[in-house]
Image (cartoon, grey):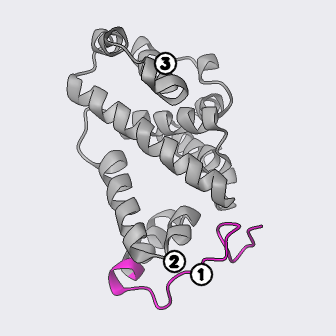
Amino acid sequence: MSTPDSPTALDLPQADPLPEATQKYFDICEDKLGMIPNVLRAYAFDIDKLNAFTAMYNDLMLGDSGLTKLEREMIAVVVSSINRCWYCQVAHGAAVRQLSGDPALGEAMVMNWRAADLDARHTAMLAFAEKITKASAETVEADRQALRDAGFSDRDIWDIASVVGFFNMTNRVASATGMQPNPEYHGQAR
């Protein structure tokens, strides 16, 4: 079971001391977010794994894309909701609330994205994310065409699929390790 000092139920202590670059990254998180997300603390037992995780996360969620940051967070929450990943529902639900300025949207994404007041673009994007999460092998050209019809480019479809794939992986790691969301997330952007 995790404790306030441990981000997961596993006994994998953070590297000590942290490499200078990692400490700088954690300091930036502390300055910008007011905390170090537990997912980063969880990976900090192995700096190579932490670096791989953060590189992929930063590219997918913050890098150049035709998808907005909010759209990528919406995908993260819907995938995490389907997978019932406690950590990611809480953390990324807070991000949706913050980025949208709409606490109800953040809650809908966590509880039942289909209850949210979404436009055709977001409905198509999230239906695709849901299908990939539940039955990726059943994806066919009509699914990709529905995204094109909603205004997504082929590069956008790649980005949607990549965000979905990433969160399916991280959800499983977070759930398997008993990763706990930082308490600060619960009250953010409400």
- The answer to whether residue 39 is above or below residue 144 is below
Please identify the quadrant where the C terminus is shown: top right
Q: Residues within 10 Å of mark 3 (few under 14, many from 20)?
A: some
- The residues colored magenta run 1-23
Provide the secondary structure element on which disc 1 rests: loop
In the rendered image, which quarter is residue 39 located in?
A: bottom right
Seen at 34% across and 8% down, the residue is: 142
Q: Mark 2 points at which residue?
A: 45
Amino acid, disc 1: Pro
Whether residue 16 appears in magenta in the rendering, the answer is yes
| Residue 6 image position (x, y, % from top left) | 67, 74
Earlier sequence position, callout 3 versus callout 1: 1
Q: Residues within 10 Å of mark 2 (few under 14, many from 20)?
A: some
Contact (CB < 8 A) between labels 1 and 2? yes
Seen at 54% across and 71% down, the residue is: 41
Query: How far apart are labels 1 and 2 at the CA level?
Result: 6 Å
Amino acid, disc 3: Ala
